[in-house]
Amino acid sequence: MKGLIIDGQNAGASGDMFLGALVDLVYIDEKDMQIADKKRLALLQELATKIIKATDLSKEVEIEIDVIRKNQFALQGVQLKISIKEPHRHLKIPQANELLDNCFKVLNLSEKAKNFCITAFQILFEAEAAAHGEPLENVHLHEAGSLDTFVDILGSAYLMDKIELYNAIIYVLPIALGSGSVTFSHGTLPVPAPAVAEIVKKYQLPVHVGTLKGELLTPTGAIIIAALAKLFESRFVPRCPFMTIKEIGIGFGTKEFEKIPNGLRLLVGNILEDEYPKEEIAIIETNVDDCSGETIGFLSQRLLEIGAKDVYLTPIYMKKGRPGTMISVLCLPEEVNLYASEIMNQTSTIGVRISYSSKIMLSRKIEEFKIKISDKEFTVRGKIAYNKLGEIAHFKPEFDDLKLITEQTKLTMNEVVSTVRALIAAELKKRK
């Protein structure tokens, strides 16, 4: 399944950064980067010209567009420079919808793309209404009603159509809000600005303050992400999901930061979590050097008996070269207290480390097989694992059942293992 990861962890997201990252993804197969960027510029100029023409402001608008290939701290992507001189307007909902309808006629967008645009502007008007305590019908846009915003949203809608991203599962990593203050038509206000704060709150976008000063998540950036999250299958995640990355698009903003690239990354690939079962796990660890081997052995068995997914021991060297043991336990996140308490109660440790992770697995099930060996019939449980196509990847007989057969026959364990595996393999082959 195709996945799209929106990564604004360092520098947030703005409309031109999102559009720039999408521009970086088109013509990505072109081997000559200069030719590719010329095609990108031509495409963007054509889009902007059509949008301005649809607004009936062609004679009153001056526009300059440039696509700049940029490198920042080992990241390479696109910085868009879009300068639009236009008459000052205060757009209300009917006017904005009329402009969108006119643009839809000239851009030939899909229904999904149209819904995205309509939803994005609806989110923007609702956020402005909530921020200013006004009825929705009275709200009018200032900076956010400029043609820049229309180019960012309609351009993004068009390019997502072009590179077929509306069918992707969308993953949103925590977005940097920025800090300090921002100055605009309503005055100087703390970051996040009221409209951004309303969007983040209503749509529960994952955010963090970040380390950089200034506004990093802009209203246009927020409404693009919120609209995608509202309309399409999306997940807010603290870290990148398991995936194979096929393409990377980076859109740079105009600000320059020390040691941190001002870029928004879009990562496109195949999500492995949708091909294999996934499970969230907790990892509990502690190091001990003054605990007997008998106690550690007892603890390991005890943890498995009460339901730990796995327990493993690692020999280590600790302070002053003393040999010790690292005890590691895998369990479900909600069971951390149970196993942490058991470790601290049964050993000399005064604390444990806890980390959380995800794992993907082959789907599996346990079946029982009737096996005849040495004129005796036994029941052997077998764990069968399946690949993503539903085919048998491998199987393993349960060791306790093999041990019982060995004890009740004159065969060795190796003979029992090879015989049982051959009989189970023959039975599974019949099922194909």
Image (cartoon, rainbow, N blue to C red):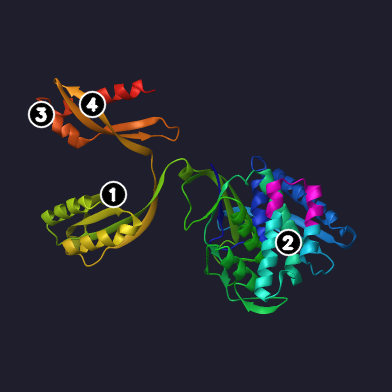
Q: Nearer the viewer, mark 2 or mark 3?
A: 3
Q: Secondary structure at mark 2?
A: helix
Pointer 4: what residue? 370
Pointer 3: what residue? 408
Q: Are marks 1 and 2 in contact (CB under 8 Å)?
A: no
Q: Which numbered dot is residue 309?
A: 1
Q: Nearer the viewer, residue 389 or 319?
A: 389
Pointer 2: what residue? 149
Q: Nearer the viewer, mark 1 or mark 3?
A: 3
User: Which quadrant would the C terminus be assigned to in this image?
Assistant: top left
Residue type at mark 1: give it.
Answer: Lys
Q: Secondary structure at mark 3?
A: helix
The reply to whether residue 416 is in sight is yes
Precedes in sequence: disc 1 or disc 3? 1
On the image, the x and y values in percent for residue 331 come to 30, 53
- At 60% from the left and 53% from the top, the residue drawn is 76
Magenta span of residues: 99-116
On the image, the x and y values in percent for residue 427 come to 30, 23
Q: CA distance from mark 1 to mark 2?
A: 51 Å
On the image, the x and y values in percent for residue 237 come to 49, 56
